[in-house]
Amino acid sequence: MAPQTATSQLLDNCLTDAEFPELPDFTRGKVRDAYKLPDRRRLLIATDRQSAFDQVLAAVPYKGQVLTQTARYWFDHTSDICPNHVISYPDPNVVLCKDLDMVPIEIVVRAYLTGSTNTSAWTMYERGERVIYGHPFPDGMKKNQKLAETIITPTTKPTGGGHDAPITEAEILETQLVTHEQWRELAEKSLALFARGQELAAKQGLILVDTKYEFGIDENGTITIADEIHTPDSSRYWRADSYEQKFAAGEEPDSLDKEFLRLWIAGQCDPYNDPIPEIPADTLIAFSNKYVALFEQLTGLDFERPDPAVPVRDRIRAALVSELPEYFQAGN
């Protein structure tokens, strides 16, 4: 048998399954595996599964760790704006958090006209729409152009594997998905969180282009941010020093986010109608490197790569045994 290459070792040690039968009420999302614990607690484990165009496509080395630690940085730096769901971090991939009553919409905040999915502002603009998510857009705009002002473009949350669907503020209030007061607070907090994100990203030479927030309501009725915040899965980041030149040339910005993979896929097929081809190993490694580079540039911290000889799943299990021993005791 041929010896493993460094690439194959990395790909083989990705975390694709975080289901532990000892823990209760397991649910699986595209990226995170979750458990509902007593006393309004949840356990979220970020895997290395990679989704795009509402499909799970591959596994990306270090991805779950990058997402968890990037979100941790932002939760720590925005807690004065909005409370978050975090209780503790038992492992670099794991968050023990509050179990919230989730708000049934996702709040997407945009500062640029861009994107490649069916719900992105650029895709809608390119097909001729000039009122997008209730906001008027002038003719003559170009892809990746900065908007005159930051806007909120909410979507409904998919259920049963469905797709995100655009919705306007008026429709949210008309259908009473949230109250008027809740919507006002959600909008204010989202814009404030985004402004903080733009400010701190700019100091590190990055542009926070757009992002998605998910909120819930805690046991005291407080609106609380959940899931993740300003990660490369939920946000776009561009390198600030090359943006103007790339935009003037009609080229895609230098990005450090999920758009890299979306554009690769869109270059191979129509992801909404064609089978998506297998993603080559070198593309997955390049993608992983972008996520790690974003974490380091954004936070100013060194990314601590785990020991490749220790399976990620084994490390996480050991952390859970230590954090939640009552579930792993003999006989349970």
Image (tube, rainbow, N blue to C red):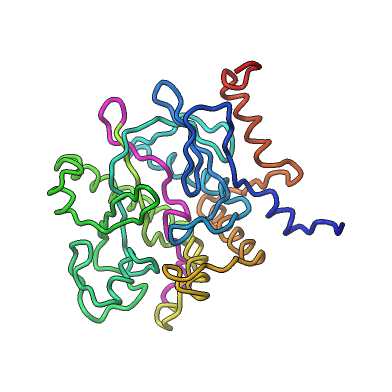
Q: Position of residue 261 (x, y in %)?
A: 52, 65
Q: Nearer the viewer, residue 70 or 65?
A: 65
Up-down: is 278 above or below 93?
Answer: below
Q: Position of residue 26 (x, y in %)?
A: 49, 34
Up-down: is 239 above or below 157?
Answer: below
- Furthest residue toward right: 1
Q: Nearer the viewer, residue 53 or 289?
A: 53
- Furthest residue toward bottom: 249
Q: Quadrant of residue 272?
A: bottom left
Q: Position of residue 329 (x, y in %)?
A: 63, 17
Q: Residue at x 61, y 62 (%)?
A: 284
Horizontal arrangement in the rendering, residue 300 relative to residue 196 (left or right): right
Q: How many marks?
A: 0
Q: Residue 223 in magenta?
A: yes
Horizontal arrangement in the rendering, residue 249 relative to residue 21 (left or right): left
What is the quadrant of the C terminus in the image? top right
Q: Quadrant of residue 244?
A: bottom left
Up-down: is 267 above or below 93?
Answer: below
Horizontal arrangement in the rendering, residue 238 relative to residue 323 (left or right): left
Q: Position of residue 111 (x, y in %)?
A: 31, 63
What is the quadrant of the N terminus in the image? bottom right
Q: Residue 93 in magenta?
A: no
- Furthest residue toward left: 174
Q: Residue at x 45, y 75 (%)?
A: 252
> Where does the magenta region start and end?
218-244
Q: Residue at x 52, y 50 (%)?
A: 299
